[in-house]
Image (cartoon, rainbow, N blue to C red):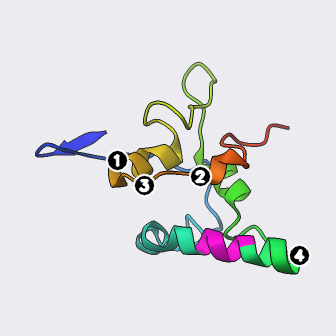
Amino acid sequence: MTTSGTVPIPNPPKAKENFSAEQPCVAPKEIIRRNHGQFLKHQREETMRRGVRTTQHSLVACINCHVTQDAAGNYPSIKEGSEHFCRSCHSYAAVSIDCFQCHASQPDTP
């Protein structure tokens, strides 16, 4: 984490790969940062209510791409520290994360 004055600014880990050859993520960074909660809610509604399963705004796809292992090969905890991709910004914004009461906070492993 870097600092600006006395406020720590999040420095989330980089994604493992680009979404496509044309763009690094499913949407530009500014749009994702502002709207990711809405994207996830919309994805939830499409999946749970309509049975539509896509990966563009899937929480599982986000976790699989953005949650990275440390040098020892361990995934960060969502509950402690600020190394977890989601936790790094949610702690900064003082927003609780309830997604992981049901969903996995670490990538699927083959």
Q: Depth-wise, is mark 2 or mark 4 nearer the camera? A: 2
Question: Under tag 3, what secondary structure?
Answer: loop
The kind of residue on which mark 1 rests is Pro
Left/right placement of residue 107 relative to residue 72 reads right
Observer-nearest residue: 12 or 41?
A: 41
The stretch of residues the image draws in magenta is: 39-44
Observer-nearest residue: 49 or 17?
A: 49
Q: Quadrant of the N terminus?
A: top left
Question: Under tag 4, what secondary structure?
Answer: loop
Q: Depth-wise, is mark 1 or mark 2 nearer the camera? A: 2
Spatial distance from mark 2 to mark 4, Cα to Cα? 22 Å
Q: Position of residue 78 (x, y in %)?
A: 56, 38
- Crowd rating for badge 1 (residues with CA inside 10 Å; few <14, some 14–19, many 20+): some
Q: Which residue is mark 1?
A: 10
> What main secondary structure does the magenta stretch of the protein show?
helix
**Looking at the image, is 69 positioned above or below residue 38?**
above
Q: Which residue is mark 2?
A: 98
- Which of the 4 quarters of the picture holds residue 46? bottom right
Q: Position of residue 13 (x, y in %)?
A: 48, 44
> Which callout, 4 or 1, points at the residue further toward the start of the chain?
1
